[in-house]
Image (spheres, rainbow, N blue to C red):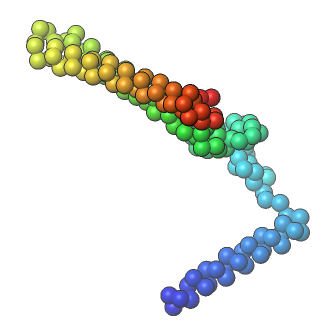
Amino acid sequence: MKKLLPVLFALHVTCYMLHVTISLANGWTPACDPCGFCVGGQKPTDWDQCSACLAQEGKNWTILGCIPNSPGGFIQIVLQTAVKMIGGIAFLAFLYGGFLLLTSSGEVQKITQGKTILMSAIVGLLMVVFAVFLLRLIGLEILKIPGFGE
């Protein structure tokens, strides 16, 4: 029985593909477009954005938005998102450290903790800035990777 299941599955897939091929050859067209609009139905809320994205060459529409389908473009989007998230986390650390300093009421332990958090946020931001600088320097100037700095 275990040997029969893969054979039946392959037969099923083959019949389905044959059915689709014959249907397409006889003039059948799919009822839905790549953005999810189906004939006789309502347009999805993001249909305009999706169709504008797909009109651009080298872009794909995903749940995250319009993303380039080249590896360099995708990595650039990921790095930009990561830097934004790190900046947001650093901003929250600044707020928390400042809050601790302002509400310390002269307690040495809270002052030290607030200063440590502020210093850690500053050092973290500097590390990210220098890492991005080094990546761009190495990627653009030294290795000359195409599409790296766009």
Viewer-nearest residue: 4 or 129: 129
| Quarter of the image where one finds residue 71 | top right
The image shows residue 74, relative to residue 112, as above or below, that is below
Query: At 21% across and 20% down in the image, what residue appears?
Result: 116
Q: Could you tell whether 110 is left or right of 126 in the image?
A: left
Residue sitting nearer the eye, 29 or 82: 82
**Residue at point 71% right, 47% down?**
35
In the displayed structure, 21 sits above or below 128; it is: below
- What is the residue that sits farthest to the right in this orientation? 26
Q: Residue at x 27, y 14 (%)?
A: 98
- In the depicted structure, whether residue 41 falls above or below residue 65: below
| Relative image position of residue 102 (x, y in whole percent) | 22, 10
**Number of numbered markers:** 0
Q: Is residue 40 found left or right of 92 in the rendered image?
A: right
Residue 53 visible to the viewer: yes
Give left or right: position of 62 versus 18.
left
- Residue 51 visible? The answer is no
Determine whether, in the image, residue 46 is placed left or right of residue 28: left
Residue 57 quadrant: top right
Q: x, y percentage for residue 132?
A: 46, 27
Q: Which picture quadrant has residue 94?
A: top left
Residue 70: where, in percent of width, then height? 64, 43
Image position, residue 101 (x, y; %) = 21, 12
Which quadrant does the C terminus fall into? Answer: top right
Q: Find the residue positioned furthest to the bottom.
A: 1
